[in-house]
Amino acid sequence: MTKNKSEEIQNKSDLFQSEKEKIYLDKQDKLNYAYAEKRHKSNQDNFNTLMHIIKLPYYIIYKFPRYIIQKITFKSTREQQQRELERLKIVVEAKDRARNSNVLKELEFIEGFKVIGFKDKLNNYPVLQNIELTGDKETLTFKSNLSLNSWIDNKNNLETVFNTNIIEFKQFEDKQLIILETTKKDIPEFVNWNNDYLLPELQINLGLTALNNVSIDLENYTSGIIAGSIGSGKSVTLMSLTYQLLLKKQYRLHDIEINLYDGKGGLDWYYFEDYINSFDTDIENFRDTLYKIEKEYERRKLLFAKKAQKLSIWNKKYPSQKLPDIFIIIDEISVITDIQGMETEDKKIRQKITKILADLARLGRAVGIHVIIGIQVPNMVTVPGQLKNVLDMRISGFLKDSTASNIILNNALASKLNHIKGRMILDTLEYQSYFLDVESETIFDCINKLNNTTIDTNKTIELSKKRKQAIKRDNKDNVIADIDLTNQ
């Protein structure tokens, strides 16, 4: 008879009982069966007794002493609990000390560095020196033998293993010390321009990081280049900068002269034509404009001799002879610099323009001349060394390869940017630039109203005192313009 699973695990007594009920027994068999059953039961009792005897040392050596000890220690349960609490308190204090000394965080960083293989030639990982938390920003200081570019090139990997966003890389005079400004917040993907964002003097509001406004002072950044592939937002960024200069001029916040050359034939910039000093799409006309600016440079250089070191000092010392800052803005410099396959005469025109631009960018700072250019495909031809080396402001949107990124930023960050229109990098600082809708019917309304209004110079804004004051910021560390833009 086949047995099921439950029958297979029955013990001998159960098996004996079940088999007894399955068969028919005669009288003699019953007697024999009764004897066998008695014999079996006797054997089982003997087995149980034997097991108790075998286990006796176990009870004597372990069970009984344990029972006695438990009885004794039961009376001191409260004391034992108190000791346990004190021990836990010591452990908690030790962990707090570890946290305060950054030990746990340092171990976390080392594990992250190991995951991405971020170490120097001697197989040493960066060592955490300090952590500073300010609002949503966490500033990390590391010491290592790795170059700043090594940190920058590994930005995406570092953000992944540490689950944070790196806002900016900085380096001390001690080249072994690197600062990472990080946050858990994300950079916005779209920020519309508002005239309330306008800043005083030559300060330009570029956009937003995850935490702060990004601004530059064009009195310090005298010339610059803005790069980016098609659709990256390069031209819109250049337009936003130009528009802010135009507002400063129209609001009488700063004396500015704007000269624009559009290498794309004026299709993008024709909205600005009525508001700027010169607007050129023809290469020869632009050359003539540069000749005039070159002569003005020579005039100012002689004028400032032994009187003023730079334009801002001149305007302060001689307010009756104030001179404007002159801006040369070029969208798509490659139309000028890429001379491959051109006729000799065209080459000479463009080479002359490139030399004038390089000279003005290098020497024009003191007399208030600024050169700002845009480029889609930067390479050694379109951005020649004589021009690139004198452009101190470097901004780039997404670029397709690291070589192009290195030409503009001296690092590969632009080639690793997310494909978000308007996402730009200033040196190593990633931000979202403002979107300027030049096709909007209202974007130039404020300027048109000003052009039709006689401005009372007695009500213009006096900034001479404000220059001496620190820039005002709100509780989120955003710059607050200390000028009243409603005063027309």
Image (tube, rainbow, N blue to C red):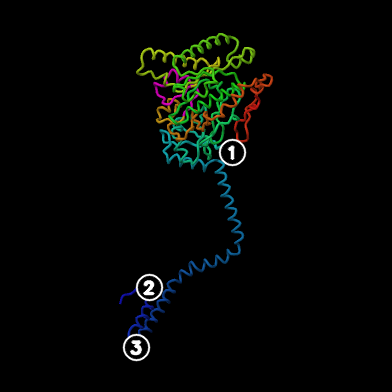
| Mark 1: amino acid | Gly
> Counting residues from the N terminus, which is met first, the one under dot 1 or under dot 2?
2
What residue sits 52% from the left and 21% below the top? 273
Q: Is residue 299 left or right of residue 113?
A: right
Q: Is residue 350 left or right of residue 69?
A: left
What residue sits 64% from the left and 14% below the top? 319
Q: What x and y, as percent, mark residue 330? A: 47, 21
Question: Is residue 392 covered in magenta?
Answer: yes
| Mark 2: amino acid | Ser
Q: Is residue 385 left or right of residue 462?
A: left
Nearer to the camera, 233 or 478: 233
Q: Is residue 477 above or below residue 305?
A: below
| Mark 3: amino acid | Lys
The label number, if any, that marks residue 30 in the structure image: 3
Could you classify mark 3 by the number of other residues whose Cα lies within 10 Å: few (under 14), some (14-19), or many (20 or more)? few
Nearer to the camera, 154 or 280: 280
The label number, if any, that marks residue 135 in the structure image: 1
The label number, if any, that marks residue 6 in the structure image: 2
Cα–Cα gap, marks 1 and 2: 68 Å
Q: Quadrant of residue 37?
A: bottom left
Q: Is residue 319 above or below residue 17?
A: above
- Is there a contact, CB below 8 Å, between mark 1 and mark 2? no
Any part of residue 222 in sight: yes
Q: What x and y, as percent, mark residue 427? A: 49, 28
